[in-house]
Image: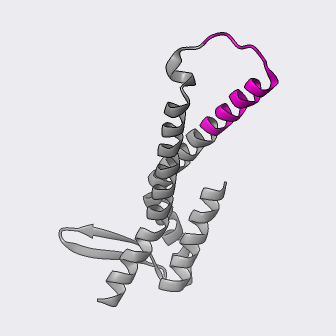
Amino acid sequence: MVIFLCWFVKLVLKIYLFGVVFIVEYDDDVYACTAEYDNYKGIAITSSAMMEIPGLLILTIISVKLMLTLTWIHSSRRREMLGIQTPPRRRHLTDSRNLRRRLHGYKVLVVVATVSYITMPSLTLHVILST
């Protein structure tokens, strides 16, 4: 939910601050989809959504995987503290170093994906609008 809210706020800010929704490169030329007129804003929002939905889905899947890993770690730690006996598992699933390494990888991936997904179009707009 937070990811979709950030994406929507980014889209609205791009339209109202820059007047440009997304940028397409084709045959070494740069084309910008603009939303200068009110009757084109719906088309601009729809086309921008179609361009950005794949990245949004990847970011959402990564975030859900991170949340599931955190939930699994929390429940396993809770079981350990309560002394609940669980059937023996394979060693690589309960190795704490492996879990920490995997969790750190997920966190870094989510941070990098979020920062690049939100800032890169704005940086591209700044470069194109300044030239």
Q: Number of callouts in the render?
A: 0
Picture coordinates of residue 6, whole percent (x, y): 60, 64
- Reply above or below: 58 against 102: below
Report whether residue 117 is seen.
Answer: yes
Picture coordinates of residue 18, whole percent (x, y): 47, 84
Q: Residue at x 51, y 33 (%)?
A: 97
Q: Residue at x 66, y 31 (%)?
A: 72
Q: Residue at x 56, y 64 (%)?
A: 7
Picture coordinates of residue 37, whole percent (x, y): 51, 85
Image quarter (top left, top right, bottom left or bottom right) of the N terminus: bottom right
Q: Nearer the viewer, residue 110 or 58?
A: 110
Residue that sits furthest to the bottom in the current view: 130
Report whether residue 36 is seen.
Answer: no
Residue that sits furthest to the right in the current view: 82
Q: Nearer the viewer, residue 96 or 72?
A: 96
Q: Is residue 74 magenta?
A: yes
The span shown in magenta is 69-88
Picture coordinates of residue 50, whole percent (x, y): 46, 58
* Prevailing secondary structure class for the magenta stretch in the rendered image: helix
Q: Residue at x 79, y 20 (%)?
A: 83
Residue that sits furthest to the left in the current view: 27
Q: Is residue 11 magenta?
A: no
Is residue 31 shown left or right of residue 19?
left
Q: Picture quarter containing residue 24?
A: bottom left
Image quarter (top left, top right, bottom left or bottom right) of the C terminus: bottom left
